[in-house]
Amino acid sequence: MDRPIEIRDRSDYKRRMNQLLRIDPCRTVVLTVDMQNEYLDLQRGAAPVAPEDALRVIGQSRRLLEFARAQGVPVVHAYVKRRPVEIEHGLGLAPYVEAS
């Protein structure tokens, strides 16, 4: 017989951890990875995620980026750029990968 699942209230732990969190704009950066239309634009992307996931990611990312910029935290956007050998072996996802 399976043991019963114990659900613990972690709200106090979360509150205390958030009190310790300090963002130093001189030592912090926000890094986004693969936030391009390829995955998040349901009309143009060749490999989009589920619509509800795209909306959630875009909305939460917007909030984070607006906060970071207001605090003077640098924002860096990164994405995968396929090497010619990867494209030759069919590892490009979108029809426009070769153009990049």
Image: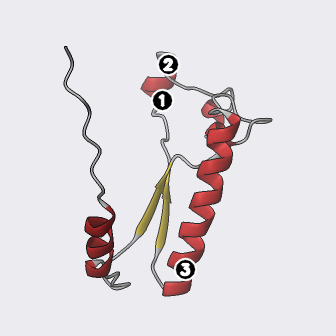
* Residue in the foreground of this view, choosing between 82 and 7: 7
Residue 20: x and y in percent read 25, 79
| Residue 73 located left or right of residue 9 | right
Q: Give the spatial CA distance, label 1 vs label 3.
A: 35 Å
Q: Residue sitting at 33 percent across and 64 percent down?
A: 11
Q: Amino acid at mark 1?
A: Pro
Q: Residue sitting at 33 percent across and 84 percent down?
A: 24
The residue singled out by tag 1 in the image is 84
Residue 51: x and y in percent read 70, 36
Q: Residue sitting at 53 percent across and 68 percent down?
A: 64
Disc 1, disc 2: CB below 8 Å?
A: yes
Q: Amino acid at mark 3?
A: Arg
Up the image or down, 16 lies above or below 91; here it is below
Disc number for residue 69: 3
Residue 77: x and y in percent read 51, 59
The residue singled out by tag 2 in the image is 88
Up the image or down, 44 lies above or below 20; here it is above
Q: Residue sitting at 25 percent across and 66 percent down?
A: 13
> Sequence order check: which comes first, mark 2 or mark 3?
3
Q: For the C terminus, which image quadrant? A: top right
Disc number for residue 56: none
| Residue 80 located left or right of residue 22 | right
| Residue 16 located left or right of residue 76 | left
* Residue in the foreground of this view, choosing between 86 and 42: 42
